[in-house]
Image (cartoon, helix red, strand yellow):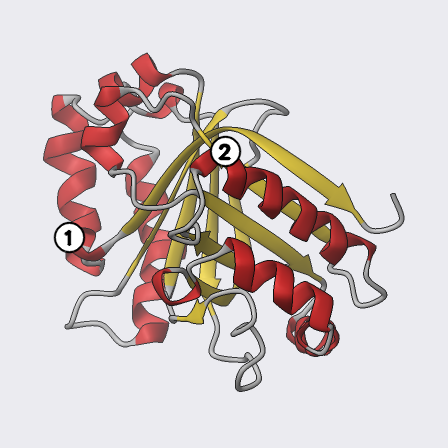
Amino acid sequence: MWRITAFLKRHPGLTRKEFILQAEALMTRIADHRGAPVRVILNLPMDPLPVELATMFGDRFDAVVELWFADAPSANAALAQLAADEAIGALAASAIDQGGSHAWLAEVVPQIPPPPAFLKFVVAGQMADNFTLAEAQEYWRTEHPRLFLTVTDFVPYIVGYTQMHGRNELAPGAIDWLAAHDFYPMCAEMGLRSVEDVVTAYSMPSYLAIIRPDEEYFSKPGEMLSFASDRALAWDQGG
């Protein structure tokens, strides 16, 4: 499967509550469109966002949207139809700070299947300067999970792990109606059970000594987008 991941920032004239209502209306319109993605997910912000997570991940974005497709050609075909819909464009422009938002296409690479309900955080980053795109994604897909799974006191905290490998296969302007197209070669969704588990897991000596240095080896953690969510709305094609 492939998907658009969009980190969305609300229009400056809206409160977060107003933005969420408008974003839900926009996603409903997208899901009902004849060019609808296979699945639409609107990940909502934690309310309130715990101080611990605000410190770890920041609070720059108001939602993360997922538009799922079977492959890159079907993504481009559907996005072209959505881009041509003036009503969808108007809804998006009134709800979203499009210049402050980021969206791109990626191929989905599952690692640990998530449970039905979990605390999700989404992070997206750039590859380290000493890697090519192919090298960084291959290392991340194979070597990093292998190392990760050896850290036996950390692994039980992770109940879901999905990688999104960025692909430069979007048609020009395909996603501009929703957000600025900014290519991120690596995006991950991590699932944990609770805020307490997030804080515990990512402050463990084993994580800091083994996993974190490996993340810094193939990526640029200081340049990441991040978002924490404990609730989501979903629309599937055909109901």
Vertical position of residue 106 compared to residue 46: above or below: below
Circle 1: element type: helix
How many labels sit on residues? 2
190 in relation to 225, above or below? above
From the image, tell me which residue sits under label 2: 17
Kindly identify the residue that appears in the image at 25 percent across and 30 percent down.
54
- The one of 104 and 23 positioned closer to us in this rendering: 23
Between 62 and 73, which is closer to the camera in this rendering? 62
Q: Quadrant of the C terminus?
A: top right
Q: Is residue 51 left or right of residue 33?
A: left
Q: CA distance from mark 1 to mark 2?
A: 29 Å
Q: Is residue 163 visible?
A: yes
**Residue occupied by mark 1:** 222
Whether the residues at callouts 1 and 2 have beta carbons within 8 Å, the answer is no
Q: Amino acid at mark 2?
A: Lys
Residue appearing at x 37%, y 59% in the figure: 186
What x and y, as percent, mark residue 114?
56, 31
What residue is drawn where x is 66% and y is 77%?
76
Q: Is residue 82 above or below residue 55?
A: below
Label 1: few (<14), some (14–19) or many (≥20) C-alpha neighbours in 10 Å: few
Q: Residue 21 at what x, y percent from top left?
A: 60, 39
